Amino acid sequence: MLSIVKLVVQALLTSFLLAMSCSFAAAGINRFGPFSVDSMRPDAIELNGEIDAGSALAFRRALTAAPNAKLIVLNSNGGLVQMGLLIADDVFQRKMATLIPAGSKCFSACSFIFLAGSERRADGQLGVHQISSDVPDLQSAQMSISDIIDVLHRFGTPTDVLTIMFRTPANDMYVFSSDEVAKYHINRSASDPIPAAPEAAAANPVTTAPGPSNAPTATTQAPGPAASPSPSDALASLNPNAASQLSVLEDYARRPTRLAMFTGLDFAGEDVGIEAVADAGACAQSCLAKGSQCKAFTFNIQTAPGQGPNCFLKASRGQADGNSVAVSGEFLTRSDPNPSAFSIGTIDPTTALHKNVDLVGADLSRRPHPKAKGARECRLACVANTSCLAFTFVAAKKECWLKSGIGQPRAAAGMVSGTKTYQTVSPATIIDLQ
C-alpha cells in the first residue's frame, strides 16, 4: 500500500510542477541592470546586485515598465554613492515603500535607497559606513557628505543612524542588529509622522529632526508613533488609500516563495474551504487563489475526481495527523525557515483502525472523553494526547475511551478501535515557487 502511495505521490508532484509551469508561462521577468520587474507582480521592483554607473537610468527604465510600482525590494552590497542618492530620490518622490527581506542585505549606497522609503522594513541586514573615494579631492568629498546629509534628513533618517554611518570607517561596515533596528526606529510604518518638507530640513540640517516644529530633537527621540494623531493619521482619515503602501509591503512579505510537500500526512482542522479537484496541483492552485487566507492544504488521493471533496484548504498547518492516502502542502514565505523533521504519534485511519473490535482495559479515565462523539474525533483525541496509546469508540453510546495501552482485544459489534505508532515526518520535497 505504501509503495503505491509513493508512486501516486510522485505523479501528483509532477502534475503540480506542470500546473505551476503553465501558470507562469505567460509571466516574464524583465531586467534592467540590477533591477527586475515580474509581470505577475508589477507592484514591486527588485534590486539584486551592485549599484553601478548605469543603475539610476536602469531604475527609471524599471519604473517605466512598472509605473504603478509601490515597493522596492533590496538586496545589494552597495556601489556608487551618487547613483544610490539619485535612485533614493526617485523612491522618495514616488512615496515608495522599501523592504530588505530576511536573508538579504542592503549595504553602503543601498542604505540610502532603503532610508528613502515612505514605509520601510529591514527584515534582513542593513549596513552603513563612511563614503570612500579614489580621488583625494577634499572639496568633492565635502560636497558628497553635504549631499548625503541633506538627502537623508529629507528622508527622516534618525540622527543615531547618521552618527553611526559617519563614524564607521569606509573599509568597515556597521550592520544594525534587530534590537538596534527597533531602538533607532529604523523601520517606519503608516502611523509614523511624515518627514518635514525639504525647505524645513534645510534650515538646520544637522540638529533639527524631521517632523512638526514642536517635536523633540532627533538626538533625544527618533521618528516614531506620536501620542496624538499624526499628520499621516489625519491624511489617512481623509484618504483611505493613504496607508496602502504598508499593505503592499506586508503583502509582499507574506507572498509564498516555497511549497513544502508532505506524503502520508494530513493537516487536520483549520479548514477555510473544501473542493473537488483533479489533482494535488489543482488543490495547490486553489489555495494560492485564496491569497493570505490559505496557507496549507491536504489532498486525499483515495477520493477519485467527481466522487466528492478531495481538496481541503487550510488557514494554517493545524494538527499533523498521519494518513497514508493524504498529500499535504504548506506554503512558506520569505521569512519562514524550511520545515525541519518532527516526530508525531499517528493512528492511520486507513491501516490502523479495527472495526468491530474492543480493546478491553487500560482506560485513561473512568469516564469517556467528554467531547469526542464520533470515531474520527475519538481517534484525533488519542493522537493529541501524549498519554494515549490506543482508543475504542462505542458507536451505540457515542462513547470514546482513551487508553494507556493496547489492552485485550475482543470481537464486539459496533465498536471501532485504533492503536498509535510514532513516526518521524519531514518534507518529501520543497518546491521553489520563484
Image: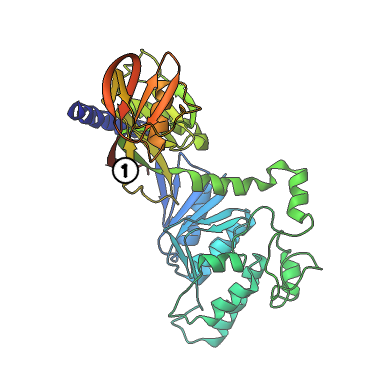
Q: Position of residue 191 (x, y in %)?
A: 69, 54
What kind of colouring is applied to the model shown? rainbow
The quarter holding residue 328 reads top left
Residue furthest left in the image: 3
Q: Pick the quarter of the image with the N terminus.
A: top left
Q: Position of residue 51 (x, y in %)?
A: 44, 64
Residue position marked by numbered label 1 in the rendering: 430
Left or right: 218 as drawn, with respect to 12: right
Q: Nearer the viewer, residue 325 or 389?
A: 389
Confirm whether residue 320 shows in the render: no
Q: Residue at x 48, y 32 (%)?
A: 270
Q: Position of residue 138 (x, y in %)?
A: 54, 87
Q: Nearer the viewer, residue 368 or 189?
A: 368
Q: In the displayed structure, would residue 358 be above or below residue 382?
A: above
Q: Pick the quarter of the image with the C terminus.
A: top left
Confirm whether residue 292 shows in the render: yes
Q: Position of residue 200 (x, y in %)?
A: 76, 68
Q: Nearer the viewer, residue 198 or 242?
A: 242
For the residue labelled by badge 1, is the local secondary structure a helix, a strand or a loop? strand
Residue furthest right in the image: 214
Left or right: 12 as drawn, with respect to 174: left
- How many numbered tags mark residues here? 1
The quarter holding residue 95 reads bottom right
Q: In the displayed structure, would residue 272 be above or below residue 425?
A: above
Left or right: 415 as drawn, with respect to 144: left
Q: Amino acid at mark 1?
A: Ile
User: Mark 1 packing: few (<14 Cα in 10 Å), some, or many (20+)?
Assistant: some
Q: Nearer the viewer, residue 122 or 383?
A: 383
The quarter holding residue 311 reads top left
